[in-house]
Image (cartoon, rainbow, N blue to C red):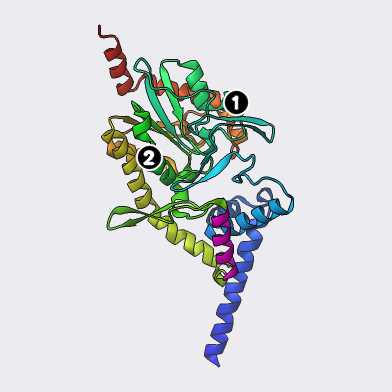
Amino acid sequence: MRALRLLIFIAFLLLYTEGSIRVLNVFPSTSLPRVLRGLQSQIREALRPEDFQWKQEFVDLVEAKRKADSDFFMDLGKGLFVPHTTRGWTPRPNTRLVSFGYRYRINSKGERAPVEFVQTPNRFSVLILGDSFTFGTEANDEFTWPNLLREHQPKLNIANLSVAGYGIDQMLITLREEIDRYKPDLVVVGAIADDLDRVVFGFRGFKKPRFDLIDDKLVLGNSPIGSLEEVYRETKKELQEGAPFFQSVSLYRILRSRARMRKLPALDKKILEALVETSRRHGADFLLVSLDRSRSRANAFLRNFSEHENVSYLDLSETFPKNFLVNEGKHYLPEEAGYVSRSVQKNILDHPSYRKWLAHQALP
């Protein structure tokens, strides 16, 4: 009888905790005391969508678009992105379209750029990798910070291979596959805190590759990526076979999230090391840029990594104008992209690799 009462108490405690988490998660932040706002922030961070939620959202979206007879963003119609065998997705080459009022132009190599990249010896070649903040989501072509950098500093030959939604794992795969084609003098990785978290997912909007750290080595899994139809059928079948009950339990997801976050620093460090090593092995220097407007948990990690690896590091959260912070959580406005472009330009022009290149250009 005592054991039964204990089980009932434990069940009640778990149900109470689960209910409290769910209520706190949806409660308006402005109505909460400061101590509960902090707890709510941690809960929302832990309850961000995982693979299962992303897969369900993907299947629902594909089916809704097909019922409406409209183009999915990765479909073979008018979409901006297409599936990619190794990276998950990439911009569709030779594309011009207007999406939600913003003009997007993708050149023949899949870069968000108004011109074609041409290797020229009298210009310093810069290969840029990043996510939607560097790709330029919700911005016209002329207001992405890499395009502003290209416009304002003609001595720089810019290739922007950033892709919306990428984590640093997909940036690494892109660099490994493209560095021989572009032969850059400098590789710039622009990252926000979320890009470091994305490496633990095998699905985020669409199926993506994922590295595991085995015996201190990066091992690529969840690859190759199939076509849109293949990924849809594969994902639909997986969902029909049933997701574990615990996937819908908030408390379980929080515990999973904490376990995952404990593994994250070692995996992120290894991927960043591979980005630096790949760049240097191909004769390019490396610049790491933190694009967050305000300080995040990633800033100290990136700074420590840069100091340990002797890598140039630009932390924009330290200097971002305070009047820009009203747009926190959204993509860059034109004036914000301009500030990022000027900051990165100054860092590049002061960079040892650029100064060395400039001195070599001055030789008779």
Which of the image's four quarters has the N terminus? bottom right
Q: Can residue 207 be seen in the rendering of this structure?
A: yes
Q: How many marks?
A: 2
Which residue matches tag 2?
177
Q: Secondary structure at mark 1?
A: helix
Alpha-carbon neighbours of circle 1 within 10 Å: few (<14), some, or many (≥20)? some
Place of residue 182 in the rendered image (x, y in percent of width and height, measured from the top left):
38, 29
- Distance, label 2 to label 1, CA atoms, is 31 Å
Against 218, residue 338 (above or below) is above
Which residue range is magenta in the image?
229-242
* Lower position in the chain sequence, tag 2 or tag 1: 2
Q: Is residue 214 above or below residue 85?
A: below
Residue 168 inside the magenta-drawn segment: no
Judge by depth and name the residue closer to the eye, 107 or 44: 107
User: In the rendered image, which quarter is residue 19 located in?
Assistant: bottom right
Residue with the mark numbered 1? 334
Which residue appears at 44% of the width and 51% of the height? Answer: 209
